[in-house]
Amino acid sequence: MEKERESDTGGFNNRLFKIKLLTGMILGKGLILLTRLLGRGGTTLPGRAVLKLDPAIPSALAGKLQDGSILITGTNGKTTTAALISGVMKESGLRCIRNQSGSNMSWGVTSALVEASSLTGKPAGECAIMEVDEGAFPGVVQSIKPKGIVVTNVFRDQLDRYGEVDWIRDAIKRGLEYQPEEGFQVLNGDDPSLTGLVAGKNRWTYGLELELPEDRFQNTGRDIKTCPNCNARLDYSRIYYAHLGHFHCPSCNFKRETPDVKLTRKKTAAGGGEVLEIELPDEKITMKSSLAGTYNLYNILAAVTCAVAMSIPSDVIIRSIEEAVPSFGRMEQFNWSGKSITMALIKNPVGANEVLRTILNQSDKISLMVAINDKIADGRDVSWLWDVDFEYFVAKKEGISIILVSGLRAWDMAVRFKYAGISPDSIVVEENTEKALNKILKLTSEGENIIILPTYTAMLEIRKHLNRMGLGKPYWES
Amino acid sequence: MVSINIYHLYPNHLNLYGDRGNMLALCRRAEWHGFKTNIITVEPGDLIDFKECDLLFMGGGQDSDQKLIAGDLKIRRSDLVAAIDNGMVLFAVCGSYQLLGHYYTAHTGEKFGGLDIIDLYTESGSRRLIGNAVISCPLWKPEKTLVGFENHGGKTYLGPSVKPLGKVLIGFGNNGTDKTEGAVFNNLIGTYLHGSLLPKNPWLTDYLLEKALSYRSQPHQLRELDDSFEQSAHLAAIELAGSKKHERLSTRA
């Protein structure tokens, strides 16, 4: 980018840009500092201000990364996949820049780059691993020119912002087309909406080749039901979750191809967690994982495939995946006076169903707190709550001692539980998240498991309260 | 026990935005009122008889799904029209509401013929109309409010033979200009409101159930239920819809 500028527009514009860059860095860093002092994450405002000053700044900063950047997009699994990939990079000796709070619009990416670079724009790292919102994706690809792109899946999410799943798929397609030709792309081979996309030459896919028990949460969230080529109804020989699985179209030739990287075996490990057998193009590897749930199998595969695409040796990959712990807000664990607290972000039907399924398979007696906000970052529309299979969950889960609902849309959630078959007498409503957290801590006894299911901004609030209680660090320090 | 036959049209194709919540509300409340419900899900090509149906529910769908089901519905059109003339209850949300009119245009500009059952048409707008909505509905005296969330690219215009479901207090409604939302024609109700509509507006659920009961058998007076949760959710939605922080979104189509 810098070089282009020099040759295209001459020295004056180049000097002008350098001044703008310096101004942008001072402004951006100042705003990050200021927002942090005010107890916020500093991920939105600084980036917005810098982009306003000159939208070429993130591109100039990313251009200085020695090993380039990798963008992760898709509906579910971005944060965990990004964390896993940066784990692999760290293990191979690279310092990564990340937008780890999940602020994944273009300004979040910009804030992260500004924060991690010197005033002259020199990055404090060799590579950037960024998760990017599907809608922001085409623009970020154009400006960052990533070396690698990982696409996890396409589900229904944030339709209040984007209207339709078809539109999201189209945004991802455009993003892939903007990537420089020498880059590599990693796509979920079990997602029919992605495999149909025409992608670059250096294209890798991953998928599951396991026998898993029947998916009881299937009645919801099947967002892609028809063949992306001919619109006929897709047939499946195996479904892992929602529309992810082994698909084929009965009327045209479209079908799941054998992926480059596949998970072929999974068994429970002796000391907890799972042992995974993964087939790479030319070797078979075995690793332990402490990340629960089918969705994490996909996240791990995405990260492994990305590492394989970068020719990272398999021992490095194994070591880093085995060390991985759940990311920010994704099944995070806290302990407080003998009570275990698990916090898992929920934001769309498919992701929420996966979290519920994981809870069903795990702990015994639980107290449940669900905190629903409807701010922009959560999605303004709370209709998705009705597509989450709370019916099945409350029918199957024995020993839920408390159900507490909170957040701006606490009453919506209260009604949701009522229609899922819970008696209104046993639903506690406390809109204020801090009061709700205190209440559930007070009402549960020692040794009990508290499960907190918040939407994104509710998660930030609850994190803040937990931090004040001395549990965990603010996310911008972790 | 009196039972109500509820037909759910194309749940695999028309299931956007929590439409499942509308079905749940109909079934749960019917049970709480002491009635049995028979749910019949209908997929394209299924053999069904609308004469057996008391209440038909159709949800919202994406353009690609809508295209697929429109063909199937057109084959059934004359049966459907006969049932509606007869007083069958039909509740249609978003995509299927558009489909009941003369025509609708997709965001690609493509024009599709509708079922021509009610006097309305839908043109695609340049921006999507998205946000919390509150309407005042004259199905009751005094009028009651209905709250929901709208998210549509199409702008719907009503002809003279249909009445709007309500007047927009907050939000866009049918087209963002004439302050109308939804349509009522015989026992057919079409609307852009989801969110889901029925759970947070229990009086509308009961209205549909009452109509379905009197269509099939004797008029029934439904019993009083404790709706304090639904009331609170309804009021909270009105407050949020009206607050400055919840400015309406109107994004590109």
Image (cartoon, rainbow, N blue to C red):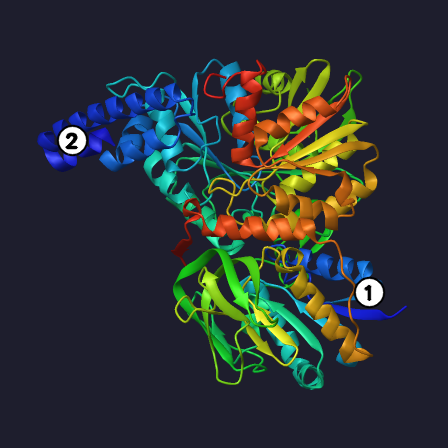
Q: Is residue A282 left or right of residue A394?
A: left
Give the amino acid type for the residue marked by disc 1 in the picture.
Answer: Thr
Residue A147 in which image quadrant: top left
A354 vs B217, nearest the viewer = B217
Q: Which chain does tag 2 point to?
A: A
A2 vs A369, nearest the viewer = A369
A388 vs A206, nearest the viewer = A388
Quick check: can you spot residue A262?
A: no
Give the amino acid type for the residue marked by disc 2 in the picture.
Answer: Glu
Q: Which residue position holds label 2?
A: A6
A118 vs A448, nearest the viewer = A448
Q: Is residue A257 left or right of residue A199?
A: right
Q: Is residue A228 left or right of residue A334?
A: left
- Alpha carbons under labels 2 and 1: distance apart: 73 Å
- At which x and y percent is residue B155? 44, 69
- At which x and y percent is residue A329? 58, 28
Q: Residue at x 56, y 82 (%)?
A: B116
Q: Is residue A416 above or below residue B141?
A: above
- At which x and y percent is residue A390? 73, 44
Q: Residue at x 58, y 43 (%)?
A: A409
Secondary element type, mark 2:
helix
User: Badge 1: few (under 14), some or many (20 or more) residues near its Cα, within 10 Å?
Assistant: some
Quick check: can you spot residue B123?
A: yes
Q: Residue at x 71, y 19 (%)?
A: A340
Q: Which residue position holds label 1?
A: B37
